[in-house]
């Protein structure tokens, strides 16, 4: 078979924040660089990020520094983070934010003319650099314009279905153009995965269709390990009504700017859910919580701003106890607490979103919100300094990489993660490419096999429609591997996933290869199944509750599990194996940070 | 979304669809006409499809995909009005399908969905929007002044607010689609960059840190003069950006300073200082 | 094998293997809009034609434009020795057959013709370019304002300067209208109020203009270093949001003011006197 082929030093898969930052870094390091992305350039899921970029710049609070940010990140992740990633992240985030300004980003300002920083859940100080509530858009547009200005090649609407390897590691990637359905192969000694997350494995999610876990699955298939996949973050506040917008995110800034959560009897129920771990730094009375917005030094934070896992579980419990809102959520009220003009100025996109999508005026009435699958903390196991996976030439940055956020990610740490590790991955990928000796060649039989696999759904006839399989998988994960988990349910989920895998192998697709969404979905389903299996297996094995993983049958945190990572790898026969690995321990001088008073 | 002190859209003739009619109850069967085909030809196909309370046009298109037309091509991503992917024309008007609520149509109204007319069609509702990416690549890049000695850039909020309005752009290309300069005249695509990139130039020209003068380029290379400010771009913008009043007209006035106003030109010569 | 060199910047939208650019979707209808998109251009045409017909008739009529103490705004400033009344210094003697309105016609005509709002209105409604959004225009070629004569729209700001002078004169006329028929101060009639309102609306129209917004502060890139001009810009921006409304209101008030003077001068009505 004849294919369109290209040769590069570095191929970046994904054009969100991490992918574009990696491409810029690789290009600046002198590598011939290409970006391959499933959507048009600038449409990546990063645009959905609203709150801001967490960076201890100290513009709002001079006493903030990287150590505080590091400690907040580790505590938010319930100490399961890779300490070195959390350290690099906290140290480098301020510089990554400043360089965005050199590329044209326009953040909101302090009265001194510096970058303004806002409060967010789990952060000791106001430290999120932001632009209203559309920070993700600003970030993606800035990086996109920088990428274009540098002249990096971008393959838009092009999907990678396979990573190509030889005995020495990565040799390239194989994929298809969505527009024509024709195949394309890239020969490259370095591939950076920046494909985002797995939200489409769940029924209610804030993620777009692109979040099919394809990067996780490609890495697994290429021989890399996935670490701590059981930790899936359910954002506490997604829209719940009308059904067509269920899951769409309601930014945490609503709470940061004064919004509170209430149940059907009007109680601020979060005061009943303050865990001991955070009791010292959380307000005990509504009066203290309300004072905090104006005087952060002498008051403690409102419990609405506890880390996301705590708030999501609390909402889940309220709804289960019958104290939910009419459509199965709780009320998020800013209308009765802040003037309409303030809400429109501080939260323009939220105002717009509810007005346009739900016909609700958030300056006049409370929103209905509930948990929505938002982020996967688990991902490709990487070396902290280089973002390199265990397969030589394979790198991963952003949501697809694991370790950085431990068992739970703090809001705002995602955008800074993209920038810090995107840059590190791109630079390391360029370096790897320059050092790799010998010819990197694409083997024809590998390409032919990849093409055959991609076309298989057309060959079969009378099989099932892929949409039906996808919705069953989403329902399974939602019901059985959701916010609250038990062993029998997860065992059932694994059985169902096995059945779904057989059905995927038999489904068929109508039409032809040109821009055919049914075919695209058929090719995404194996990825979704692979990550769903990893999540369920790891969740079943981890017999404790921690961060984004809550076991009804093991409600307590277990110190032994607190020192253990779970790594999924794929055997030669395609089965997933799970291994326990010790969590790397931080050096004593860093551990001291945790002994100080919060 | 109107911020204080900013002009609103000038025309009153093209108000957004109101909230009247339809909705209510548990759902109904709607008549949909969807353009299906590719560059070699196509036609409007009629479907009867279920519509539930609170849905938008994109939900209905997805239902068609899942139940009646598995290979119906449609481009979409976030379904929350933030990414600008699901642009199409609904009853002849450029819209984001995810922001077009079904409750704006009467239950007995036939809803017609067609691809963007200004761009070559790929298949069904998906068009080839590469024109826009080619124009984007031609914009002279942002070039900042040096940082302050402490490594920061200092800008005041009042100075960043004007260009920030244009950075709200989600690049849905609806303004490019509705602009008659290229919609009705394919041959103008070479000389005219479209409203999106005129406001991008305005953004850069108003950027407090940028040091490049793009006024000549705006006129000569990006076709600012082709715009006859008929404001359709402002009317379709889902982000409510006042493209014409706050972007294109100020840019035209800045070009006048440089090219058509002898007094301003003379003033800038005599005083020997940049435009501030 | 094709090899992309470093930095070609090919942002490929997904033409697998290249090939010719395909055409647009084949849709025969000029527009698929289902609303009454033709209504707005139609109303604009009717209103503008009505004004042009009336104002042309009055400008060429060369009579009934003055009724002590009021002068029609179409004839002010009245510059020739043939002018009735003494509202403005008589500067020269022109041929009898030329109405004094003709000498000054270019100024109000110029600012309105080059006005960013009226351009939109007449390009849409008269030139059908386009008649409404997403409705195909009938022209084969289109060059916009890139060449003569439409490139001349860029002189708008000079008409603004002239219009401000004219507005000041019309305001002066309104002040003079506080005198009675004998020249004594302390009079006010309905005509005084009409001239005053007309002068105010004309100022609002001129000051809300996009060129004005640019000149007072819009051309600056740093508002924070020019706080006073920023204040001006903020005020003009607020007015600018209502530029269209001021454009129509002042057009109507000019015609009404003229009509009132006409009716007085022809003796059809007499002035309603307040004091």
Image: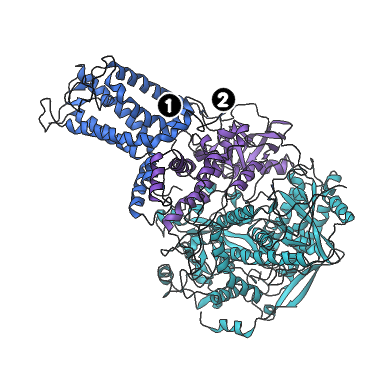
Q: Is residue A579 rendered to the left or right of residue C231? A: right
- Give SS at disc 1: helix
- The chain coloured purple in the image: B
Instruction: Determine the colour of chain C.
Output: blue
Q: Which residue extends farthest right?
A: A445
Say which residue label 1 marks.
C44
Residue B237 seen in the figure: no
Q: Residues within 10 Å of mark 1 (few under 14, many from 20)?
A: some
Q: How crowded is mark 2: few (under 14 residues within 10 Å), some or many (20 or more)?
A: few
Q: Residue A294, percent across and down?
A: 40, 68
Front-lying residue, A277 or B16:
B16
Q: Which residue extends farthest top?
A: C97
Q: Are marks 2 and 1 on the same chain?
A: yes
| Residue A19, picture quadrant | bottom right
Q: Can you tell which of label 2 and label 1 is closer to the viewer?
A: 2
User: Badge 1 sits on which subunit?
Assistant: C
Residue A222 vertical position relative to residue C223 in the rendered view, above or below: below
Tell me what residue is drawn at x 35 percent, y 26 percent: C106
Q: Residue A339, percent across and down?
A: 39, 56
Say which residue label 2 marks.
C139
Question: CA gap, disc 2 to disc 1?
Answer: 20 Å
Residue C65 vertical position relative to residue A434 in the rendered view, above or below: above
- Give SS at disc 2: loop
Q: Residue C94, percent across and down?
A: 26, 19
- The chain coloured cyan in the image: A
């Amino acid at each position: 078979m004849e294919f369109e082929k290209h040769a590069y030093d570095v191929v970046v898969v994904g054009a969100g924040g991490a992918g574009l930052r990696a491409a810029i870094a690789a290009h600046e390091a002198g590598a011939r660089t290409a970006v391959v992305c499933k959507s048009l350039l600038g449409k990546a899921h990063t645009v959905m990020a609203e709150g801001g970029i967490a960076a201890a710049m100290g513009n709002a609070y001079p006493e903030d520094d990287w150590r505080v940010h590091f400690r907040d990140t580790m505590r938010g992740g319930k100490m399961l983070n890779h300490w070195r990633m959390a350290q690099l992240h906290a140290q480098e985030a301020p510089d990554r934010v400043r360089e965005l300004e050199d590329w044209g980003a326009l953040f909101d300002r302090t009265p001194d003319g510096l970058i303004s920083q806002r409060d967010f859940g789990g952060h000791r100080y106001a430290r999120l650099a932001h632009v209203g509530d559309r920070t993700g858009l600003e970030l993606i547009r800035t990086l996109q314009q920088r990428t274009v200005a540098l002249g990096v090649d971008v393959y838009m609407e092009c999907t990678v279905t396979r990573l190509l390897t030889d005995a020495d590691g990565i040799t390239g990637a194989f994929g298809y153009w969505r527009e024509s359905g024709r195949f394309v192969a890239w020969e490259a000694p370095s591939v950076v995965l920046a494909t985002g997350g797995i939200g489409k494995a769940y029924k209610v999610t804030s993620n777009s269709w692109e979040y099919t876990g394809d990067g996780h699955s490609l890495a697994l298939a290429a021989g890399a390990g996935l670490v701590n996949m059981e930790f899936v973050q359910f954002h506490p506040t997604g829209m719940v009504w009308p059904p067509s917008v269920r899951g769409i995110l309601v930014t945490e800034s609503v709470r940061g700017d004064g919004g509170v959560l209430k149940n059907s009897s009007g109680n601020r129920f979060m005061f009943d859910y303050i865990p001991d771990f955070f009791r010292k730094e959380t307000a005990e009375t509504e009066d203290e919580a309300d004072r905090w917005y104006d005087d952060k030094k002498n008051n403690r934070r409102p419990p609405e701003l506890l880390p996301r896992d705590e708030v999501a579980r609390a909402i889940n419990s309220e709804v289960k106890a019958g104290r939910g809102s009419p459509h199965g959520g709780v009320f998020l009220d800013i209308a009765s607490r802040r003037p309409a003009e303030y809400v429109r100025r501080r939260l323009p996109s939220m105002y717009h979103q509810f007005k346009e999508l739900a016909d609700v005026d958030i300056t006049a009435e409370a929103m209905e919100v509930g948990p929505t699958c938002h982020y996967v903390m688990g991902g490709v196991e990487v070396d902290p300094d280089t973002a390199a996976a265990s397969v030589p030439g394979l790198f991963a940055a952003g949501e697809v990489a694991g370790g950085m956020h431990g068992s739970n990610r703090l809001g705002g740490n995602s955008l800074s993660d993209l920038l810090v590790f995107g840059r590190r991955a791109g630079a390391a990928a360029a370096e790897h490419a320059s050092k790799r000796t010998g010819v990197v060649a694409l083997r024809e039989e590998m390409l032919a096999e990849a093409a055959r696999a991609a076309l298989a759904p057309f060959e079969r006839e009378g099989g099932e429609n892929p949409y039906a399989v996808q919705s069953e998988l989403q329902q399974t994960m939602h019901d059985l591997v959701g916010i609250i988990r038990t062993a029998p349910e997860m065992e059932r989920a694994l059985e169902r996933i096995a059945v779904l895998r057989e059905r995927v192998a038999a489904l068929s697709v109508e039409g032809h290869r040109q821009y055919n969404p049914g075919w695209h979905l058929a090719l995404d389903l194996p990825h979704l199944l692979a990550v769903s299996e990893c999540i369920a297996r790891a969740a079943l094995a981890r017999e404790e509750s921690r961060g984004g993983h809550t076991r009804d049958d093991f409600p307590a945190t277990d110190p032994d599990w607190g020192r253990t990572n779970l790594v999924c790898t794929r055997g030669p026969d395609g089965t997933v194996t799970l291994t326990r690995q010790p969590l790397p321990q931080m050096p004593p001088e860093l551990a001291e940070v945790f002994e100080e008073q919060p | 979304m109107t911020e204080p002190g900013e002009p609103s859209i000038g025309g009153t003739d093209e108000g957004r669809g109101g909230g009247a009619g339809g909705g209510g109850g548990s759902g109904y069967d709607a008549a949909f006409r969807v353009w299906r085909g590719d560059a070699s030809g196509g036609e409007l196909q009629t479907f009867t499809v279920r519509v539930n309370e609170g849905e938008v046009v994109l939900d209905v298109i997805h239902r068609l995909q899942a139940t009646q037309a598995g290979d119906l091509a449609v481009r979409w991503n976030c379904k929350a009005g933030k990414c600008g992917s699901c642009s199409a024309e609904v009853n002849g008007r450029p819209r984001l399908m995810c922001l077009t609520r079904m409750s704006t149509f009467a239950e007995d109204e036939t809803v017609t969905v067609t691809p963007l007319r200004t761009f070559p069609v790929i298949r069904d509702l998906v068009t080839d929007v590469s024109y826009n990416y080619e124009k984007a690549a031609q914009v002279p890049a942002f070039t900042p002044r040096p940082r302050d000695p402490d490594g920061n850039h200092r800008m005041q909020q009042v100075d960043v607010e004007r260009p920030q309005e244009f950075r709200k752009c989600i690049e849905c290309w609806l303004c490019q689609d509705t602009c008659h300069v290229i919609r009705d005249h394919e041959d103008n695509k070479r000389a005219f960059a479209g409203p999106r990139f005129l406001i991008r130039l305005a953004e850069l020209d108003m950027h407090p840190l940028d040091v490049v003068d793009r006024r000549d380029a705006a006129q000569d290379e990006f076709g600012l003069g082709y715009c006859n400010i008929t404001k359709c771009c402002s009317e379709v913008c889902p982000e409510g950006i006042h493209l014409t009043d706050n972007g294109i007209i100020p840019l035209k006035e800045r070009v006048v300073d440089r090219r058509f106003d002898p007094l301003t030109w003379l003033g800038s010569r005599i005083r020997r200082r940049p435009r501030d | 094998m094709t090899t992309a060199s470093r930095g070609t910047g090919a942002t490929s939208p997904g033409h697998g293997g290249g090939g010719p650019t395909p055409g647009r979707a084949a849709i025969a209808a000029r527009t698929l809009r289902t609303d009454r998109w033709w209504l707005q251009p139609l109303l604009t045409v009717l209103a503008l034609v009505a004004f042009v017909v009336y104002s042309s008739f009055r400008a060429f009529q060369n009579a009934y434009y003055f009724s002590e103490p009021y002068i029609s705004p179409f004839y002010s400033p009245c510059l020739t020795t043939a002018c009735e009344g003494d509202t403005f210094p008589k500067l020269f003697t022109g041929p009898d057959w030329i109405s004094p309105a003709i000498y000054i016609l270019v100024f109000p005509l110029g600012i309105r013709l080059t006005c960013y709002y009226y351009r939109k209105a007449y390009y849409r409604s008269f030139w059908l370019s386009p008649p409404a959004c997403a409705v195909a225009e009938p022209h084969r070629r289109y060059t916009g304002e890139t060449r003569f004569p439409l490139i001349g729209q860029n002189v708008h700001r000079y008409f603004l300067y002239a219009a401000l002078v004219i507005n000041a004169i019309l305001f002066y006329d309104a002040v003079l209208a506080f005198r009675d028929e004998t020249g004594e101060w302390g009079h006010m009639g309905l005509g005084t109020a009409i001239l005053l309102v007309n002068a105010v609306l004309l100022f609002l129209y001129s000051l809300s203009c996009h060129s004005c917004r640019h000149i007072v502060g819009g051309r600056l890139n740093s508002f924070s270093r020019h706080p006073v001009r920023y204040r001006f810009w903020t005020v003009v921006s607020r007015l600018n949001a209502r530029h269209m409304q001021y454009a129509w209101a002042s057009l109507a008030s000019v015609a009404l003011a003229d009509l009132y003077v006409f009716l007085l001068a022809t003796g059809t009505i007499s002035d309603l006197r307040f004091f």
